[in-house]
Amino acid sequence: MRHRQWLDGNHRFRFQRNLFDSTEEFREALEQTIGSEILFMLRDINFNYGKMNQPPNTQTKRRSRDAYVGDVDRQINDKSNEEDDPNEADLWKKKTILNVDKKSKDNLQSRLDLVDMGIRHDLHPQVLLNRKYRLPPSIFAMSKKEKEVF
């Protein structure tokens, strides 16, 4: 690669052929170019900045005035639906926490994954006599009484 040419003329690495590519370096270092000279060399080159090969911008279709009136009607209906049940988000959170409607991701398959990984032995499913599985309660599991209090 001849990188030793950039060293001083009397540097010890220039003459150590056994440490490099079996040659001694006798060439002198080239004259270093400065930034303004490089810019002068690149003056005729056009650079394109940004992402390449993007599709051309497509103009959005202008909607008629009737479409906007329909949007206003839709917005009014949406607001009236929100006013009917303002606590819907809170109710959804409670259903998820309390495992109502089986919305939990803590199931047999996830427990079998724990067995495959060899972790959390206290959560591994237990095989019953009738070849069914029993899932031990996890740290976030709640009894029926705790759910009622919650």
Image: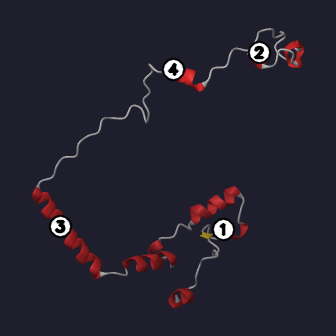
Mark 3 or 4, closer to the camera? 4
Q: Are marks 3 and 4 in contact (CB under 8 Å)?
A: no
Secondary structure beneath dot 4 equals helix
Residue where numbered disc 1 is placed:
127
Above or below 105: residue 83: below
Q: At numbered mark 3, what does the secondary structure look like: helix, strand or loop? A: helix
Question: Mark 3 highlights which residue?
Answer: 72
The quadrant in which residue 73 appears is: bottom left
Discs 2/3, front: 2
- Which one is in front in this view, the residue at disc 1 or the one at disc 4? 4
In primary-sequence order, the first of circles 1 and 2 is 2
Going by the image, does 32 lie left or right of 80? right
- Badge 1 marks a residue whose secondary structure is strand
Q: Nearer the viewer, residue 36 or 132?
A: 36
Residue 42: x, y in percent?
A: 50, 21
Q: Are marks 1 and 4 in contact (CB under 8 Å)?
A: no
Please tell me in which quadrant of the rendered image residue 90 appears.
bottom left
Crowd tier of the residue under label 2, counting other residues whose Cα lies within 10 Å: few below 14, some 14–19, many 20 or above: some
In the image, residue 133 above or below residue 3: below
The earlier-in-sequence mark between 2 and 4 is: 2
Kind of residue sitting beneath label 4: Phe
Q: Separation of disc 1 and disc 4 at Cα?
A: 79 Å
Q: For residue 19, what is the image quadrant?
A: top right
* Residue matched to label 4: 40
Q: Is residue 72 left or right of residue 53?
A: left
What crowding class fits label 4: few (fewer than 14 Cα within 10 Å), some (14-19), or many (20 or more)? Answer: few
Question: Dot 2 lies on which element?
Answer: helix
The image shows residue 150 at horizontal and vertical percentages of: 52, 87
Q: Which amino acid type is marked by label 2?
A: Gln
Task: Give the label on residue 5, or none.
Answer: 2
Which residue is pictured at 20% across the width and 72% down the height?
A: 76
